[in-house]
Amino acid sequence: MIFAFGRLMLLLLIASSVVYVCLWFYARAIQSEKLAAAWEDEGRPGSKESFIAKGLESERYALRRRLLLWVYAVPFVAVALIVYVSNYS
Amino acid sequence: MLSYIKWTFWGVFWALLLAFLHYTLPTWDVVRITDSYNRNEPIPVGSIFWANSKPGQVQGDTVTRDVFFIQAARPNTKTIVYRNEDTGFGWPPYFKFNSSNVQAQAGDFVSSLGEPRWVAIKHYGWRWELNSLFPNAVRIKEVDGPDARVVPWVSISILVGIGLVFFGIWSRWRKFWAERERHLLDDPV
């Protein structure tokens, strides 16, 4: 049972990490697209690259927090919830 | 020729996917339980159709171990036999550890044709006589009568969830390629 539990945790961790990496790059691409549009709207202040780089840097930690919560926490909470519902209710 | 290969591939793909979902997702049967017992069942080594969470006695290429069974009759008097196994932390992810409790409940619900007590049994898996496969009973609850219908909300939400995820990925994928094509047409290399 411990072996099966460890295997499940390992597989969940691997799957979550794959999803995390995919979503990370996807979200970064969306953010930089939005920043490019914002740069146009603000009348092209300074260099486009540095505007985007600065914007991405300022959103890095918020995105990491959001992704960590949704990608890693949710599957483990779901497992705990299913264990409870299917055995104790 | 190539189109035959293509269609065969997609036909096999969809058949496997549907079979997988049909095997794994829970559905409810309305039945009358006629007996509940356990027996020493020979199980092929490495079979994916039995829970492997418990070790057993190995004899050649079969494992023998005690498995709970629940026998039941459908409202149309056809019979159905369920196994009642813990899935543990293995596949499918029902995380069922309470097979003993389920068996006790099944024993409690045993009834005769004269005085039937109708129950709904949530299960996954197939009854496949040729391979001695049995669906795994997950949960039992009493219902009003043989005509009761239990809506499989869990299966419906899982299917909708899978559909939404794939639709989301697919539409983004299509948008990505449309965008690329537009760029290439706008300024060809």
Image: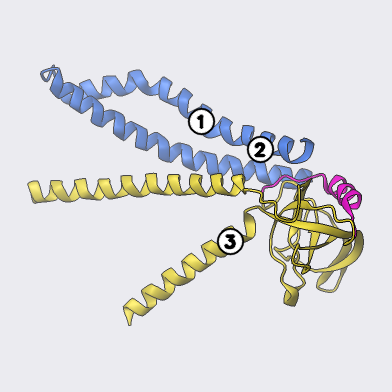
Chain colours: A blue, B yellow
In this orientation, which residue lies closer to the viewer: A52 or B88? B88
* Subunit under mark 3: B
Q: Which residues are magenta?
A: B93-112
Instruction: Find the distance from the CA under tag 3 to the CA under tag 1.
Output: 27 Å
Q: Which residue is mark 3?
A: B20
Q: Is residue B170 above or below residue A83?
A: below
Image location of residue B188, percent across then percent down: 8, 51
Tell whether label 2 touches label 3 (CB within 8 Å). no
- Judged from this view, the residue extending furthest toward the left is B187
Both on one chain, marks 2 and 1? yes
Q: Amino acid at mark 3?
A: Phe
- Looking at marks 2 and 1 on the same chain, the residue that comes earlier in the sequence is marked by 1
Residue hosting label 1:
A70
Q: Residue at x 30, y 34 (%)?
A: A29
Instruction: Kindly state the secondary structure of the residue where label 3 is placed.
Output: helix
Q: Is residue B106 magenta?
A: yes
Residue A66 spot, x, y in % from top left:
46, 25
- Kindly tell me whether residue A7 is visible in this rendering: yes
Q: Relative to A63, is B114 on the left or the right?
A: right
